[in-house]
Each structure stands twice: as structure tokens, then as C-alpha cells.
């Protein structure tokens, strides 16, 4: 299939992309959901759901209306499913997975292995030299428990961070210390054994923008993925988290090159956690919403232009975003407007930007 990239190559590409008409005129299907628009192109639109959000019937209805895929935002993380050793607690995750409204939706799993979600008892295992075994058991347990139900897993999350100075480019964590690249490879193998049909992803952030730090990070991620491929590790995709911030330096060619390099490794790509921080913008709603939408559109047009990209997941569907307001609070402490729907579940300009970008995507074969 020939992507739009081939047609839009060159300096004027962004301007052209912005001016491009939608494949389906807005007046014909202005109401079509993001999932419907995605499906028309062989893509998928999903969103994360948290335990707190699950309590809101209107949120559940909005997710069922707009999305064809869900991911539990925190409930599958190790510290939530096994806070006490050998005593699995899947209730919070199952409440999301089994919500009647979401019955028809595809389920992603986030995340089997993440240095930030190691429970205290397991940290002690790492200290005692048994971290590798504990990690592989964790992968087997969680993937096997949801075998056939969760069809795609972030097996390993945020493991590469060259700034930490390790020769293998891995983030300096107990996981890297316990087993390095061998352990990462074994995590994918364990996941594959636990569910041979699941699609297995490596997921990471800080790959979207043009900066020396992100250049170095992208290169290290590609080196990591090449190493996995060389070892015949069962890895099927890369998750671009897509935590965007208006004002950061996005360069179409830099991001497109990275996506092309991933595709050349025979990997699928999913945008897995998109939200758009308005942290640096003035308070005015209309101004923020417009700039958030424009920023997302720039990013998504490049993403959907890469044929290996299979879909988009937003990190929440409706404002507010608790994690952004906690970890990246605006100086004026106002809630950010980072998600496609407002707090009353009405569609915002960001929703329209995603819709237009999906409408303009080439149909996957
Ligand atoms: O559930 C407890 C609650 O019982 C307690 O009262 C409260 C007090 O702090 O904490 C609640 O847990 C918080 C949880 O979110 C649910 O709100 C944790 O403290 C908090 O650390 C946790 O933050 C999550 C973070 O990952 C760490 O797990 C964010 O919600 C979640 O959005 C964020 O998601 C990550 C992805 O997994 C990986 N990529 C980056 C992304 C953003 O940081």
C-alpha cells in the first residue's frame, strides 16, 4: 500500500496535510464515532478506563459509543494484581474488562513489566537476587490469567533510557540489574508461551519530539528492538505513548523517520496513551482547545501516514486527566483540557482533530 507520505514528501507536506479534504464529507457523517471512523480505515480507536471512571455511567456510555478498544489504566499493574505475594487480586481489572457496556470492545493489557509498578515484596526479591524469577512468574501469571481475553499486551514498559549510562541502553532499574537484555527477551518469551495468540508490544514515551534527548532515546529503542529481533524474540509491536505537550518541538520528518525505522523491523505501531498537555498555555478555554487540537492533528497526521500504525488509544476519554493534573500541574492549577471530550462528555476540538485525522488516513490493506 502506498501511504500519503509518498505523495506529501517535501517541505510543504504539513500545509498540504492540513488543507487536505476529509475522505467523508463532515455533513454526511458528523456524528460518526471515532471507532467508526477508525474502522473505515482498518484502524482502531481505543481509550484507557480507570476504576474511578468506571463508576460514572455517562463515562461508560461515552467509551462504548466512541471506542472499539479499552485498556485498564492502572488495574493490571503488578502492584495492583499482586500487592501481596502469591495472592492475586484481579477484581479491579475484571470490573473494567467485564463491564457490560464494554462487552464488544477489544482489550489491551498494560503492563506486565514496568519498573514503576513493582510491589514491595517483589522489590525485596530483587534485593535477594531472585528478581528474575519473580518477574518471569509475574509475566506468565498475568498473561495466562487473561489468555484469549486480552489480545494485546504491553509486555515491557519504559525499559530503555540511555541517559542512565548503561552500555546496553537500558534504564537503570532493578529489572536491568537483575537480567538486562536477557531478562527483557525472556519476558516476551514467557508472555508468548502464556498466550501464543496475544500480540506483544514494547511501550515507551519521549519518542515524539525533536530534541537531543529524544533523538538519543529513539536510537536506543531501535537498538533494543533490533537486539530483540536478532534473538528471535516474539515481539510484534511498539507502543508510542504519545503524551504530548503543546509547545514542544514536533518535527514531522523526525517522527516519520522513527516510525519508518520501526516498520522496517517488521513491527506494528500503536499510539497507546495519547493526551495533550496544555500546561504552558493561558487559561482561556477556546485558546487552549484550539492549540491542543492543532498539536494533536500535526502528530496524528504523521502517525496515520505510516502504514504500520494500527490505531490510537487515548489516556482517558474525557477531561479531567488526574495524572496530568497531579504530575504536570498547570501553574494556575486549573484542570488541563487534554482529552477528546469535556467533563460533560461533549466533543471538543481535540475530538474533531482526531476524527479529521482518521478520515484522512489511507485505508489499511
Ligand atoms: O488507587 C490509589 C488510591 O487508593 C489512593 O488513595 C491514592 C492516593 O495517592 O492513590 C491511588 O493510586 C494512584 C493511581 O494512579 C490511581 O489514581 C497512584 O498513587 C498513582 O501513582 C497512580 O498513577 C498512575 C501512574 O501511571 C503510576 O502507575 C496514573 O494514574 C497513570 O495514568 C500513569 O500511567 C502511566 C502509564 O502507566 C505508563 N506511561 C506513563 C503514564 C503516565 O504517567
Image (spheres, rainbow, N blue to C red):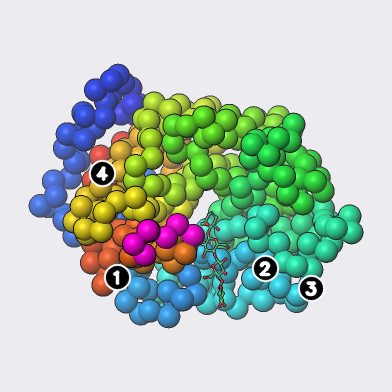
Q: Please tell me whether residue 20 belongs to the stretch shown in magenta.
A: no
Q: Quadrant of the C terminus?
A: top left
Per the rendering, the mark at residue 343 is 1
Q: Are marks 2 and 3 in contact (CB under 8 Å)?
A: no
Q: Residues within 10 Å of mark 1 (few under 14, many from 20)?
A: some
Q: Are marks 1 and 4 in contact (CB under 8 Å)?
A: no
Question: Does mark 2's beta carbon lie closer than 8 Å to ligand 1?
Answer: yes
- Residue under label 3: 86
Q: What secondary structure is marked by label 3? A: loop
**For residue 114, what is the image quadrant?**
bottom right
Magenta region: 327-333
Dominant secondary structure, magenta? loop
Q: Earlier in the sequence, mark 3 or mark 1?
A: 3
- Residue under label 2: 79
The image position of residue 17, as x and y in percent, is 24, 32
Q: Earlier in the sequence, mark 3 or mark 4?
A: 3
Quick check: 10 left or right of 74? Answer: left
Q: Residue at the far front: name it.
A: 331
Per the rendering, the mark at residue 294 is 4
Question: What's the distance in space between the residues labelled 3 and 4, CA to CA?
Answer: 47 Å
Q: Residue at x 52, y 58 (%)?
A: 108
Quick check: 50 left or right of 120? Answer: left
Amino acid at each position: 500500500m502506498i501511504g500519503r507520505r509518498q505523495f506529501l514528501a517535501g517541505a510543504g507536506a504539513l500545509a498540504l496535510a492540513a488543507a487536505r479534504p476529509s475522505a467523508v464529507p463532515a455533513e454526511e457523517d458528523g456524528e460518526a464515532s471515532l471507532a467508526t471512523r477508525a474502522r473505515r480505515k482498518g484502524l482502531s480507536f481505543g481509550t484507557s478506563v480507570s476504576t474511578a471512571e468506571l463508576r460514572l455511567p455517562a463515562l461508560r456510555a461515552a467509551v462504548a459509543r466512541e471506542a472499539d478498544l479499552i485498556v485498564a489504566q492502572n488495574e493490571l499493574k503488578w502492584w495492583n494484581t499482586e500487592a501481596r505475594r502469591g495472592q492475586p487480586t484481579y477484581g479491579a481489572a475484571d470490573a473494567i474488562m467485564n463491564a457490560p457496556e464494554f462487552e464488544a470492545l477489544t482489550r489491551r493489557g498494560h503492563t506486565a513489566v514496568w519498573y514503576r509498578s513493582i510491589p514491595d515484596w517483589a522489590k525485596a526479591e530483587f534485593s535477594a537476587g531472585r528478581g528474575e524469577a519473580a518477574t518471569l512468574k509475574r509475566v506468565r501469571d498475568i498473561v495466562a490469567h487473561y489468555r484469549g481475553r486480552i489480545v494485546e499486551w504491553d509486555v515491557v514498559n519504559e525499559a530503555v533510557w540511555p541517559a542512565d549510562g548503561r552500555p546496553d541502553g537500558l534504564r537503570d532499574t532493578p529489572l536491568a540489574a537483575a537480567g538486562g537484555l536477557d531478562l527483557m527477551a525472556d519476558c516476551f518469551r514467557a508472555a508468548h508461551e502464556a498466550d501464543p495468540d496475544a500480540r506483544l508490544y514494547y511501550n515507551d514515551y519521549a519518542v515524539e519530539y525533536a530534541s537531543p534527548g529524544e533523538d538519543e532515546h529513539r536510537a536506543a529503542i531501535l537498538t533494543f528492538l533490533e537486539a530483540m529481533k536478532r534473538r528471535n524474540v516474539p515481539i510484534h509491536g511498539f507502543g508510542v505513548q504519545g503524551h504530548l505537550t503543546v509547545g514542544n518541538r514536533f518535527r514531522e520528518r523526525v517522527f516519520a523517520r522513527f516510525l519508518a525505522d520501526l516498520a522496517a523491523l517488521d513491527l506494528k505501531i500503536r499510539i497507546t496513551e495519547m493526551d495533550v498537555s496544555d500546561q504552558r498555555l493561558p487559561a482561556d478555554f477556546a485558546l487552549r482547545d484550539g492549540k491542543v487540537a492543532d498539536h494533536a492533528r500535526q502528530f496524528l497526521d504523521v502517525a496515520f501516514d505510516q502504514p504500520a500504525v494500527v490505531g490510537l488509544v487515548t489516556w482517558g476519554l474525557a477531561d479531567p486527566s488526574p495524572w496530568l493534573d497531579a504530575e504536570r500541574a498547570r501553574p494556575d492549577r486549573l484542570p488541563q483540557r487534554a482529552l477528546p471530550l469535556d467533563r460533560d462528555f461533549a466533543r471538543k476540538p481535540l475530538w474533531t482533530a482526531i476524527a479529521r485525522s482518521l478520515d484522512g488516513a489511507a485505508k489499511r490493506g
